[in-house]
Image (cartoon, rainbow, N blue to C red):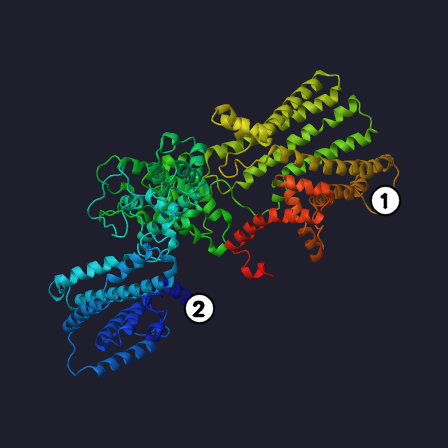
Amino acid sequence: MVRAETNSKRLARTALMSDHAYVHPITGIAGAVPTSLGNNVHIEKILSAAEQIQDEDSNIARILCEHAYSLSQNLDPNGEGRGVLQFKTRLMSVIRQNLAKMEAGAIERSEDVARLQKFYKRYRKKNRIGEPREEERRLRESAIYSRNLGELERKSILRKRVLATLRVLGTVVQNLTKEISPDAASYLISEEMKVMMEKDAEMTDDVVAYNIIPIYCSSTANDIVSFPEVRAAISAVQYFRGLPRLPNSVAIPETRNADMMDFLQHVFGFQKDNVSNQREHVVHLIANQQSRLGKPSENDPKIDDQVVRSVFDKSLDNYIKWCKYLSECPVWDSSNDLDKERRLLYVCLYFLIWGEGGNVRFLPEGICYIFHHMAKEMDEILSEQTAKHANSCIVPGSGEASFLDQVISPLYGIVAAEANNNDDGRAPHSAWRNYDDFNEFFWSRDCFDELSWPWNLSHPFFVKPVKAGKGLGSRGKHYGKMFFVEHRTFLHLYHSFHRLWMFLIIMFQALTIIAFNDNNINKETIMEVLSIGPTYVVMKFIESVLDILMMYGAFTTSRLSAIWRNFFRLLWFTTASLVICYLYIKALQNGSDSAMFEIYVFIAGAYAAAKIFLNFLTRVPLCHRVTQPCHHWSVIRLIKWMHQEHNYVGRGMYERPLDCIKYVLFWLVILGAKFCFTFFLQIRPLVKPTRAIVNFTDLKYSWHDLVSKGNHNALTILSIWAPVVAIYLSDIHIFYTLMSAICGFLLGANDRLGEIRSVGMLHRYFEKFPEEFMKNLHCDVPKRKQLRSSGQVVELHKLEASKFAPFWNEIVKNLREEDYISNRESTK
């Protein structure tokens, strides 16, 4: 376990140092920095720079090693970390060796600062800082750029190594002056040195790490920045005239111009690295979409409006759907009235929120809520002349903006508190909230009134939970589950598959009644078959009771509409069960010609028609698409609400009409076969034995039977029918398996799956590719018609191969570019 932890730390350290590897290779004492030192990356850079200049000036190397030793001493003064004591001993040995090379005398820190400054100027002058950068720029702009990539890369690495060494020297100079005195920088560091260090620091802006597009690196050898679509994408996110002026305190690197990301970073206080990543992300999205549409002009590349619209629609698709679901207007009045710059501004804001959200990204509707309010704040700030901080992100007392501290941290804090309340997964599901419960809170318009903006941290939504197992707070103190609570009970066996159970029981009841009436479909038989009405409503009553039981634990925090829906359904099916059962009993007593029977048929028929109509509205894809635009009508919403609870996720998951028809036909065949088997081979053969057993009056039992005596031998009949019922409830899997195998066989045979059984057969089919290509995918040429009519088979095959070869070469070329195949594979 210790070894695995050590390896993971070493891997993390390597990842952190990956962007500095080309600057100072980690060797010698720099490679021995233990991972237990939290600031080991900075120590490694200092020691690497010391090794680089060891041969030039051992005294300067000694100063850098002493500073690295001081850092390690501050981090772990007692050497308790793994390998720290050995590292300090080795580092001290290096320092003593350097001290032995210099003249004897006391060491003054002020003299070390002066030595560092003198060496800084000498090292800078020796490496002609600034000239390599100009050489790189001229080489990139020259016509022989592609033939000098190796030389360009060598010059770039050398320049970056020199700049990194200067950066380390400048940092050590500043730190040493602070050790002497906080005010020592005013007289120990000259003004000339300060200007020089600031200028060199600006030149290191293009040394920063990047992902794919080096937006900050103006002198990089990466050819991707020269692509017209990339240049156009970078220019598309530039600062435009409609944005307020940035304050003078906002520093923009010289290697690039100000853009939308800088504006949003200042307004909302996004982190620097997040802004850099999302700047590249947005440029990638725009450039890729533009490349699909077509490359822009080389001279003055511009992004098409269609590209921006496509990126806008795809990026904010969930937000637009969320607003439509809640009947809330988006922050823009109409997307058609938005110009290209405003669309990109919204896209940049959304990705900056998403990029800094961390684990809050698992709350997509929560991200939509945050974006909705921050976009409104941004629109208000756009009317100002000078950009200012957003009120929701201002840190109290400092006046600075921080999106992470003011927006994300409160939300993440309550999510983390709930996660810590699950007792390592042993706590019941009702005792703590998970991501679903947090996200479902934003599925209702109540979130706007309750959470407001900025966050209303006194709301019960943000109240930390009590300990697991001690119960939840009241509705006014703490929020619990939203809609769904998982209870570990066998009742799920019925509740989760209630429609299947109801269908099977009702069909078994109807088939049994028909069998006991000797297959005679008359008025009396129909009257008995209509007994499925009471069976149906009673089972729906059981379902409504289970709905309430399964929701236990979420009543205090669920939406009132969800709670009222369950109680309305319970009240409805309780009333329906009593009324339907009463009417049917009276109809049986009065006969099929009575008025009570007609009333029963009318009510049952009306309910069945309404149920079928609702199923058509919510299940059939064509009807669903027709009613979807009418969702804002109160009547439609009420009907759908009574039939099914409103949920944001999965509301649009409906198959195509053709797929729906195929699916229905598939199950009609399965159920038809099953019920035929049940009726003719299970139920009908038991009709006569059952009647005979019922009519036995003088049957003597060898065991004492209190149930069957005087009850028409009930236990005997139950023992005969029990296996039939058990098989009836389970044999649907057998018919499903058989039908799936038959359909799979037919589909496979139609698609000719498994037809090629050997490599030789594959070779023979491959030789037919040119012929099939000319026949199905290419216009027939006159020469081919002549060769085919004259019977010249060999010449015909040559012609087909010559027409097919360019397309095949293009296919292989694309496969190579996508790294699916290599050149070695294609030459076999």
Give whichever of 630, 747 is nearer the camera: 747
User: Looking at the image, is 652 positioned above or below residue 233?
Assistant: above
Amino acid of disc 2: Asn
Classify residue 295 as left or right of residue 491. left
Give whichever of 425, 341 is nearer the camera: 341
Farthest right residue in view: 698
**Picture residue at 21% right of the left edge, 37% below the top:** 385
Q: Dot 1 corresponds to which residue?
A: 701
* Gap between marks 1 and 2 measured at Cα: 77 Å
Residue 127: mark in rendering: none
Q: Dot 2 corresponds to which residue?
A: 7
Amino acid of disc 1: Tyr
* Residue 33 visible in this rendered orientation of the protein: no
**Picture residue at 30% right of the left edge, 36% below the top:** 379
* Residue 624 visible in this rendered orientation of the protein: yes
User: Looking at the image, is 417 positioned above or below residue 528?
Assistant: below
